[in-house]
Image (cartoon, rainbow, N blue to C red):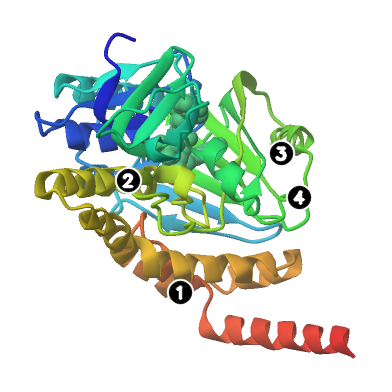
Amino acid sequence: MNRTKYDVVVAGGSISGLLTAREIGSKSSISVKVLEADHEIGTPEHCGGLVSLSGLRKLGIVPSSRTFRNHITRAKICSKSSSFVVDAKVQDVVAVDRRELDKQLAFQAQEVGVEVTTMCPVKSVSACHELGVNNSHKVENGYSYAVSTVEGTVYCKYFVDARGLSSLIRRHRTGILPSAQYEVFAPWIDPDTVELYFDADKYPGFFAWIIPLGEDRAKIGVAGRDINIVNSINSFLESKNSSYTISRKIFAPIYVSGPIGDFIEGNRSLIVGDAAGQTKPTTAGGILSSGMGGVLAGRAIIKAIEQEDDSFLGNYPNEWHSIFGFEFKKLILARKIFEHLDNKALDGLFSTVSQPTLSRISQNGEFDFHSAPLSLILNARFTSRLVKGLLEGSLKRAK
Ligand SMILES: Cc1cc2nc3c(=O)[nH]c(=O)nc-3n(C[C@H](O)[C@H](O)[C@H](O)COP(=O)(O)OP(=O)(O)OC[C@H]3O[C@@H](n4cnc5c(N)ncnc54)[C@H](O)[C@@H]3O)c2cc1C
């Protein structure tokens, strides 16, 4: 690494880190470096890539023809013996190729002057004022952090941690579920329909999913608490009783417990994206909410540098919470309710979803903010019965 001093260093070159960097890079006076551990941006791709076009627009992303994979027009939600279908044309949902999307963002960041280095994992980050005389790092005046990498140390005034769940796991251990996602070629894949399969015994705390990519291909996955993920996905595929070919297997954790802390660690160190727990507590989707963490952190850093006032860094958590805070609280509540449902209750719930409810969800429901459709599904009569049942159960246990 030739240059060793930057205004901002971002650890992690995926969606949230690249959006932070692209945002800050738009100010040519601010130098930004992205350090990515893997050998290639976007690789290995672990994401399902399901996102709405309006969500992408909010992030300032127009998917290129290489990034776009498939348009989704329906969602089929199944329990063991019941199911319903939501028409999702209005929601403009697409499956994107995350590998290409991240590359597209990396190019855009580089175009505005950001330096991106791959195969350069961050080993440790130290606040310069904490470095003692015996420390191998040199203390650099005016720089807040010494970022140690396999290629040497870089110094920066502001540090952004966008290292995803590998960083979150170090600070927070609950809410992480194992998942497996295979890329599958099979004639039985419905090209327009995302399918979710709930089964409290097979996928406790989550579900199995099919995200169609077009041309008989799909990303098929399962996640759940304390399950053997390989056995689960194999038996899900076998349950289709039809032929399929697997072209890729990926195993990656997902996170479902909501945002962690205030996203600021130390005076000038910000945490963005999955590293900050910014994924939806219901589906673990994070392209929009984690990506927006990156955008807002970038804007706050620009403001702090331009105004020479670090109190502007607080704009980032405030704005993120004003967009997602209330929604995520409702999603956490919905998750708690779902986690208490056994298969009989799930069947009962799904069978009560009426056609007028489905029409309302189709016309008004937002893909990225789905607490409103969820509360329509968890209708008042069902929820009050459930709460009554839970209370009775707790009372019995207390006796
Ligand atoms: C199986 C699965 C399916 C998903 N499906 C969807 C979906 O359909 N829709 C949706 O919206 N979201 C989905 N998500 C979530 C989505 O992928 C994440 O929310 C999003 O990628 C988070 O972006 P991020 O930049 O915060 O973190 P990540 O994408 O996890 O990126 C972290 C980056 O940091 C790098 N890194 C790690 N350690 C270091 C280090 N020490 N030094 C430097 N770099 C490092 C990693 O290599 C990686 O590039 C899915 C997630 C999983 C696991």
- Whole-percent x, y for residue 130 in the image: 45, 39
Q: Quadrant of the rendered structure where residue 335 is?
A: bottom right
Label 2 sits on what residue type? Arg
Task: Kindly report which numbered mark, 2 or 1, lies closer to the viewer in this rendering.
Answer: 2
Question: Above or below — where is 222 with respect to 203?
Answer: above
Asked if residue 312 can be seen in this view, the reply is yes
Q: Please, what is the three-letter code of the amino acid marked with disc 1?
A: Leu
Cβ–Cβ under 8 Å for marks 2 and 4: no
Residue denoted by label 1:
376
Residue receiving disc 4: 202
Check disc 2 and report the residue beneath it: 268
Q: Ligand 1 closer than 8 Å to the CB at disc 3?
A: no
Quarter occupied by the C terminus = bottom right
Residue 342 vs residue 169: left or right?
A: right
How far apart are the two marked residues, 1 and 4, measured between alpha carbons? 25 Å
Name which residue type carries label 3.
Answer: Phe
Name the image quarter holding residue 144.
Answer: top left
Give coordinates of residue 179: x percent, y percent: 64, 39
Label 3, residues with CA under 10 Å away: few <14, some 14-19, many ≥20: some
User: Do the CB atoms of the residues marked 1 and 4 lie less than 8 Å apart?
Assistant: no
Nearest-to-viewer mark from 3 and 2? 2
* Numbered disc 1: secondary structure: helix
Q: Is residue 389 above or below residue 200?
A: below
* Mark sitting earlier along the chain (2/1): 2
Q: Which residue is mark 3?
A: 236
Q: Residues under labels 2 and 4: Cα distance? A: 44 Å
